[in-house]
Amino acid sequence: MAAIANTSGEVLRAEEGSLYPALYRIEEAGWIRAEWIKKDTGRRARIYELTAAGKKQLGAEESRWQSVSLAINRVLRKA
Protein backbone atom coordinates (compact mmCIF):
# COMPACT_ATOMS: atom_id res chain seq x y z
CA MET A 1 0.00 0.00 0.00
CA ALA A 2 2.92 2.31 0.68
CA ALA A 3 4.27 1.43 -2.77
CA ILE A 4 1.10 2.79 -4.40
CA ALA A 5 1.38 6.06 -2.48
CA ASN A 6 5.11 6.37 -3.19
CA THR A 7 4.79 5.55 -6.89
CA SER A 8 1.94 8.03 -7.35
CA GLY A 9 3.78 10.84 -5.57
CA GLU A 10 1.43 10.52 -2.59
CA VAL A 11 -1.60 11.27 -4.79
CA LEU A 12 -3.16 7.79 -4.60
CA ARG A 13 -3.71 5.84 -1.41
CA ALA A 14 -5.03 2.31 -1.05
CA GLU A 15 -6.46 1.04 2.20
CA GLU A 16 -6.10 -2.61 3.19
CA GLY A 17 -9.88 -2.95 3.45
CA SER A 18 -10.35 -2.09 -0.22
CA LEU A 19 -7.12 -3.30 -1.79
CA TYR A 20 -7.19 -6.97 -0.79
CA PRO A 21 -10.84 -7.60 -1.70
CA ALA A 22 -10.11 -6.04 -5.09
CA LEU A 23 -7.04 -8.27 -5.56
CA TYR A 24 -9.09 -11.35 -4.70
CA ARG A 25 -11.77 -10.38 -7.25
CA ILE A 26 -9.13 -9.78 -9.92
CA GLU A 27 -7.55 -13.14 -9.11
CA GLU A 28 -10.95 -14.85 -9.34
CA ALA A 29 -11.41 -13.27 -12.77
CA GLY A 30 -8.10 -14.83 -13.86
CA TRP A 31 -6.35 -11.52 -14.50
CA ILE A 32 -3.64 -12.09 -11.91
CA ARG A 33 -2.09 -15.09 -10.19
CA ALA A 34 -0.89 -14.99 -6.62
CA GLU A 35 1.79 -16.94 -4.84
CA TRP A 36 3.07 -17.02 -1.29
CA ILE A 37 6.83 -16.58 -0.88
CA LYS A 38 9.09 -16.51 2.14
CA LYS A 39 11.09 -13.29 2.47
CA ASP A 40 14.66 -13.07 3.77
CA THR A 41 13.24 -11.86 7.07
CA GLY A 42 11.35 -15.16 7.43
CA ARG A 43 7.97 -13.50 6.92
CA ARG A 44 5.60 -14.74 4.26
CA ALA A 45 4.49 -12.37 1.51
CA ARG A 46 1.95 -12.77 -1.24
CA ILE A 47 3.16 -11.68 -4.67
CA TYR A 48 0.96 -11.06 -7.68
CA GLU A 49 1.66 -11.53 -11.38
CA LEU A 50 -0.40 -10.33 -14.33
CA THR A 51 -1.67 -13.16 -16.53
CA ALA A 52 -2.11 -13.02 -20.31
CA ALA A 53 -5.83 -12.39 -19.75
CA GLY A 54 -4.89 -9.67 -17.27
CA LYS A 55 -2.65 -7.96 -19.82
CA LYS A 56 -5.52 -7.97 -22.29
CA GLN A 57 -7.89 -6.57 -19.66
CA LEU A 58 -5.35 -3.93 -18.68
CA GLY A 59 -5.24 -2.74 -22.30
CA ALA A 60 -9.03 -2.46 -22.36
CA GLU A 61 -9.07 -0.57 -19.05
CA GLU A 62 -6.35 1.81 -20.25
CA SER A 63 -8.38 2.58 -23.38
CA ARG A 64 -11.48 3.17 -21.29
CA TRP A 65 -9.55 5.46 -18.94
CA GLN A 66 -8.20 7.48 -21.88
CA SER A 67 -11.75 7.99 -23.19
CA VAL A 68 -13.08 9.07 -19.80
CA SER A 69 -10.17 11.40 -19.03
CA LEU A 70 -10.40 13.03 -22.48
CA ALA A 71 -14.14 13.59 -21.98
CA ILE A 72 -13.56 15.11 -18.53
CA ASN A 73 -10.86 17.41 -19.95
CA ARG A 74 -13.22 18.56 -22.72
CA VAL A 75 -15.92 19.36 -20.15
CA LEU A 76 -13.48 21.23 -17.89
CA ARG A 77 -12.13 23.31 -20.77
CA LYS A 78 -15.68 24.22 -21.80
CA ALA A 79 -16.61 25.48 -18.32
Image (spheres, helix red, strand yellow):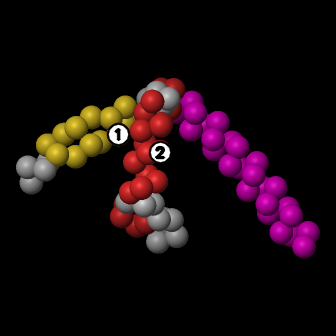
Q: Nearer the viewer, residue 14 or 63?
A: 14
Residue 49, can we see it? Answer: yes
Quadrant of residue 77 within the rendered picture: bottom right
Residue at the disc numbered 2: 22
Question: How much space separates mark 2 and mark 1, taking CA atoms?
Answer: 12 Å
Which quarter of the image is occupied by the N terminus?
bottom left
Q: Residue at x 90, y 73 (%)?
A: 79
Quadrant of residue 76 within the rendered picture: bottom right
Quadrant of residue 48 within the rendered picture: top left
Three-letter amino acid code of the residue under disc 1? Tyr
Q: Could you tell me which secondary element the residue under label 1 belongs to?
A: strand
Judged left or right of residue 74, residue 21 is: left
Q: Residue at x 71, y 49 (%)?
A: 66
Q: Residue at x 45, y 30 (%)?
A: 28
Three-letter amino acid code of the residue under disc 2? Ala
Asked if residue 46 is among those painted magenta in the image, a careful observer would answer: no
Q: Which residues are magenta?
A: 55-79
Residue at the disc numbered 1: 48
Judged left or right of residue 2, residue 78 is: right
Badge 2 or badge 1: first in the primary sequence: 2
Identity of the residue furthest to the front in this view: 17
